[in-house]
């Protein structure tokens, strides 16, 4: 039995549980406040530095064709990640979804995916990117940047690891505090653009003159959020259970709801950032990337305060993503290798990320980016197959054939892009429909699906 002191500690907890969900027809459900909190938490894990800089650069480049391009961007940068969360949740997790291809494929692909979006690329980049925006512009020229960056990354990853050690509490830290601050700062820049516009939309760049929605889709495709979507649902489910939802069906429903809310917030924020870039593009036409577009617009609107606003935006966005990725990677590798605790994995990944961010990030990027490009089509394929499973479960060969054709074609395309093949073979690649637009893997994948259906039909006839 609890003592008086313990009762004082436990009462707020049970009061919180009572507020967290309602029992409706015997089904556990979050109230609106907590649904929104979960959605904001998932949004914060998605929204990193890349998400902050792609939309304004799209607006600056697309100019008068901005909104058609934005529709394409939203389809791939918002639609695919949300569908990824839903697909993995309905399938019972990424392992179960990928196991429909083959158990060995599920293990290898999942490990590769976590390493690629974790300590081998995305996690180290959060520190290096935020340092270049939040610290470097304010440093005197005589200060050795290498030493400062090392100290910064140690502090950055140390703080991120401390938060990531408790994945069940991310809603309190990311959802209640960090993300609202980030959203307020973005709204400040957006509102400033409405009141004091930097200029009018410029003429579209060559890539956006024709088929702007297609180019926008490709821009969103490069955010790589679909890969993260296959993993973040795990952490959201942990937070949902920590808030008192225990029934598995209810956990799934709330995870899917969080995905849709995160998608709505992403779309709204992307729209605001694209609007800023569209109006800043004409005035700052020499900007080479989204970072320069945003910082130039913020400085125009608020002077030196604008630089501080942008520094805070980049730090929060990078920190939130880093925490989410450390939590996901730690949780997954602890599940497949429980000999090492979640704490050990998180601190280990943080230590590796410090080294990569300060020593070999450029070399890692040269290796990791092609790997990401090779595994990304497989992520899209798994999402699509997850929604078709009620029909495809009668044709089990579809999964291995489609994944095999998709994976092999993606790898070959990446090798061709790295100039591994000769000129004659490269010409053959360029004849594949959709290759120049970045979709050379689609036709081979469709062929794999057709072969899988034919093989499955033959198996059914033999029965």
Image (tube, helix red, strand yellow):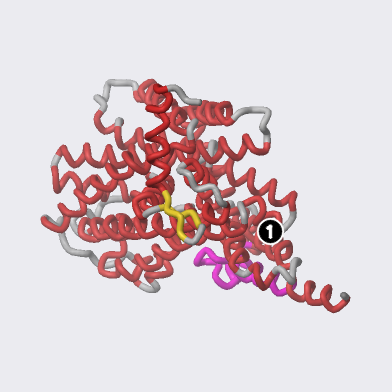
Image coordinates for residue 284, horizontal then vertical, percent: 21, 53
Using residue 96 as the reference point, say whether residue 7 is left or right of it: left
Q: How many neighbours does mark 1 have within 10 angstroms: few (below 14), some (14-19), or many (20 or more)?
A: some
Image coordinates for residue 200, horizontal then vertical, percent: 17, 63
Disc count in the image?
A: 1
Farthest right residue in view: 462
Which residue is labeled 1 in the image?
Answer: 408
Front residue of this view, candidates 55 and 206: 55
Farthest left residue in view: 196
Q: In this view of the protein, can residue 161 be seen by the observer?
A: yes
Using residue 168 as the reference point, say whether residue 297 is left or right of it: left
Q: In this view of the protein, can residue 318 be seen by the observer?
A: no
Name the quadrant of the C terminus. bottom right
Residue bounds of the magenta highlight: 426-451
- Name which quarter of the figure residue 456 lies in: bottom right
Front residue of this view, candidates 164 and 440: 164
Q: Magenta includes 443?
A: yes
User: Is label 1 in a helix, a strand or a loop?
Assistant: helix
Give the residue drawn at x 68%, y 34%. 337
Q: Magenta includes 350?
A: no
Front residue of this view, candidates 309 and 336: 336
Using residue 301 as the reference point, say whether residue 43 is left or right of it: right
């Amino acid at each position: 039995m609890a003592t008086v002191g313990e009762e004082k500690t436990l009462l707020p907890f049970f009061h919180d549980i009572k507020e967290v969900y309602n029992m409706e027809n015997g089904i556990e459900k979050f109230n609106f406040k907590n649904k929104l909190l979960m959605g904001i938490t998932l949004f914060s894990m998605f929204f990193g530095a890349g998400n902050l800089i792609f939309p304004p650069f799209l607006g600056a480049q697309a100019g008068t064709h901005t909104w058609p391009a934005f529709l394409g961007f939203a389809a791939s940068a918002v639609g695919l990640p949300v569908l990824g969360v839903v697909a993995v949740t309905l399938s019972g997790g990424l392992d179960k979804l990928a196991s429909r291809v083959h158990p060995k494929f599920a293990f290898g692909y999942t490990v590769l995916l976590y390493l690629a979006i974790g300590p081998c690329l995305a996690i180290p980049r959060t520190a290096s990117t935020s340092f270049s925006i939040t610290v470097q512009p304010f440093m005197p020229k005589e200060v050795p940047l290498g030493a400062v960056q090392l100290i910064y990354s140690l502090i950055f990853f140390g703080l991120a690891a401390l938060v990531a050690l408790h994945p069940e509490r991310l809603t309190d830290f990311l959802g209640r505090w960090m993300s609202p601050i980030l959203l307020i700062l973005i709204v400040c820049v957006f509102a400033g653009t409405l009141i004091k516009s930097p200029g009018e939309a410029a003429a579209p760049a060559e890539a956006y003159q024709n088929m702007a929605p297609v180019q926008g889709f490709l821009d969103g495709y490069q955010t790589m959020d679909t890969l993260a979507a296959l993993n973040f649902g795990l952490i959201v489910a942990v937070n949902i259970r920590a808030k008192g939802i225990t029934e598995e069906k209810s956990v799934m429903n709330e995870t899917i709801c969080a995905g849709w809310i995160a998608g709505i917030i992403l779309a709204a924020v992307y729209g605001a950032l694209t609007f800023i870039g569209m109006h800043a593009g004409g005035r700052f036409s020499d900007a080479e990337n989204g970072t320069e577009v945003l910082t130039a617009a913020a400085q125009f609107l608020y002077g030196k305060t604008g630089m501080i606003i942008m520094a805070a935006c980049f730090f929060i966005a990078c920190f939130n993503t880093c925490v989410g990725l450390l939590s996901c990677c730690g949780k997954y590798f602890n599940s497949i290798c429980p000999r090492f605790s979640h704490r050990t994995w998180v601190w280990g990944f943080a230590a590796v990320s410090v080294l990569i961010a300060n020593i070999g990030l450029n070399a890692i990027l040269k290796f990791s980016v092609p790997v990401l490009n090779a595994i990304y089509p497989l992520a899209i394929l798994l999402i699509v197959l997850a929604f078709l499973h009620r029909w495809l479960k009668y044709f089990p060969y579809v999964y291995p054939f489609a994944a095999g054709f998709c994976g092999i074609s993606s790898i070959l395309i990446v090798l061709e892009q790295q100039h591994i093949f000769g000129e004659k073979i490269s010409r053959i690649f360029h004849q594949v429909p959709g290759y120049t637009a970045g979709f050379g893997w689609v036709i081979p994948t469709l062929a794999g699906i057709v072969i899988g259906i034919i093989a499955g039909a033959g198996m059914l006839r033999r029965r």
